[in-house]
Image (tube, rainbow, N blue to C red):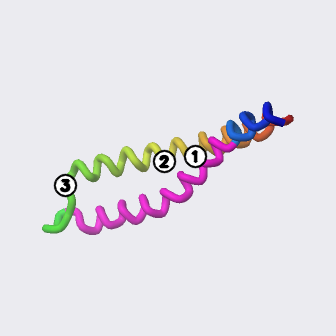
Amino acid sequence: MSACKGLIFLGAIPRIGLSACKIAEPFLITRVITFIQQHGTEQGDSDEVGYALIVAVSLLSILRPVSFLNSKTTLHHVSC
């Protein structure tokens, strides 16, 4: 049983990444909408914030499917 503990934790890592992506997505969408609405006004953020949001959306768009596929693959490989 002690040999299986490492495999179980190894299988949990992709699921944690997938959960983190699902939790972060609504906050990121809200921030992007706020940035678009305030762009060009006095309280609007600088263009660097917009570039950072582009990177964040791109990373989330890549990490979510990768972590999903990795969790499915790891689930099938983990068997004690």
Q: Which residue is denoted by mark 1 in the rendering?
A: 17
- Does the segment drawn in magenta span residue 9? no
Give the distance between the C-alpha atoms of the residues marked 3 and 1, in whole angstroms: 30 Å
- Does the segment drawn in magenta span residue 23? yes
Residue 55 placement, left or right of 67 = left
Q: Which residue is denoted by mark 3 in the rendering?
A: 46
Residue lying at 50% horizontally and 47% vertically, measured from the top left: 61
Rendered-image quadrant of the C terminus:
top right
Q: Local crowd at mark 1 within 10 Å, few (<14), some, or many (≥20)?
A: some
Query: Does 45 sit above or below residue 3?
Result: below
Q: Local crowd at mark 3 within 10 Å, few (<14), some, or many (≥20)?
A: few
Residue 28, image x and y in percent?
Answer: 42, 58
Rendered-image quadrant of the N terminus:
top right
Between disc 3 and disc 1, the foreground one is: 1
Residue 71 placement, left or right of 35 = right
Q: Which secondary structure, mark 2?
A: helix
Residue 14 placement, left or right of 74 = left
Residue 36, image x and y in percent?
Answer: 30, 63
Residue lying at 29% horizontally and 47% vertically, measured from the top left: 51
Question: Of residues 13 and 71, which is closer to you in this image?
Answer: 13
Amino acid type at mark 3:
Ser
Does the magenta stretch mainly form a helix, a strand or a loop? helix
Question: Of residues 76 and 45, which is closer to you in this image?
Answer: 76
Q: Which secondary structure, mark 3?
A: loop
Q: Which residue is denoted by mark 2 in the rendering?
A: 60
Residue 30, image x and y in percent?
Answer: 40, 65
Amino acid type at mark 1:
Gly
- How many labels sit on residues? 3
* Residues at circles 3 and 2 in contact by the CB criterion of under 8 Å: no
